Amino acid sequence: MMEQKRVTLANGIELDVVDEGPRSAPVLIFLHGFPESHRTWRHQIRHFSGVYRCIAPDQRGYRGSSKPQEVEAYTPDKLIGDIFLLADALGVEKFTIVGHDWGGAIAWGVALSGQHSRVTRAVIANAPHPAVFQRLLYTNRQQREASQYIRDFRDTANDQLVREHGLTGLLLKSVKWDRPSAMEPEERSALLEDWKNTEAAFGMLNYYRASPIDVPLMDAPFAVPEGYTPPALPNLTIPTLVIWALDDLALPPENLEGLEDVIDPLTVVEVPDCGHFVPWEAPDKVNAAMEDFLSKTS
């Protein structure tokens, strides 16, 4: 088991954090996605903590970390801000940001806002770039269909189900992209235990409820709505590695299209025959891709 320590951020949020590896080494900050924990990155932390300082929080809303219950506590600026405050609290000036799923969405934001100051590189696994994702939700049938669960996550009519059965009740109702057989039984039973915590369940759902992403109904036109303006984002100019598992039922590989227009330098590594949770479904491939990228960009 990786040991965690409690870190209090300057905004009052407390996070349980893994912090392993030499203190003088270059820093990798790992951000997990929904509905997991720092353990998303267990194979990578084990692999890299000999030569890198590996920091992996349970982010706000998850497990033992602070779980404010109001939706506005989970707007993207606050989730991104937590990561810079975590680096401050641990005395880290510059770092490589690594993220998967929701952690990848936050990592995009951390990279975009910190690229000229503190963030030296980005590694993103199966997390869509914010500009690309919204366009796909408007125009791509597969992505829109795969994302309908977000509408259920945002629907407060499901809150009673969550209060009675934790997150599991809503996942069983709404999610079609889970592959339980891919995960080690002991990891899965630990997650099932985590999902019983009602405060954490609403914390996790609030990531979706506070997000500005628009998920149209399936009968809405497959076109960019009139008057839609894409988010005004700068291009990303730090070395960036995007790892994409190609059998992701939630996020099809079309999410890779157009990345070269907004990121330079960009490295893309595709992982065939692998589902959404690539850091632990294909750990050797992820480790190899990261190893190669980190050595070339050090």
Image (cartoon, rainbow, N blue to C red):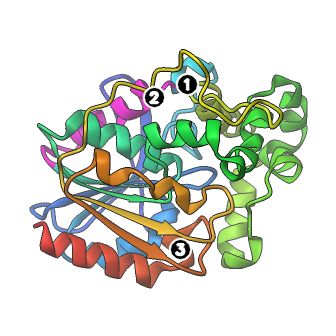
Whole-percent x, y for residue 115 in the image: 18, 41
Left or right of 147: which side holds 5? left
Q: Are marks 1 and 2 in contact (CB under 8 Å)?
A: yes
Q: Say which residue label 2 marks.
A: 76
Q: Earlier in the sequence, mark 1 or mark 2?
A: 2
Task: Using the image, tell me which numbered label, if any, was put on residue 212.
Answer: 1
Mark 1 surroundings within 10 Å by alpha-carbon count, few (fewer than 14), some (14 through 19), many (20 or more): few
Name above or below for residue 121 compared with residue 237: below
- Say if residue 1 shows up in the picture: no
Q: Earlier in the sequence, mark 3 or mark 1?
A: 1
Q: Quadrant of residue 204?
A: top right
Amino acid marked by disc 1: Pro
Residue 165 colored in magenta in the image: no
Q: Say which residue label 3 marks.
A: 280
State the residue at coordinates (23%, 68%).
21
Left or right of 273: which side holds 163? right
Whole-percent x, y for residue 106 in the image: 42, 41
Magenta stretch? 75-94
Per the model, the C-alpha gap separating discs 2 and 3 is: 26 Å
Per the model, the C-alpha gap separating discs 3 and 1 is: 29 Å
Residue 91 colored in magenta in the image: yes
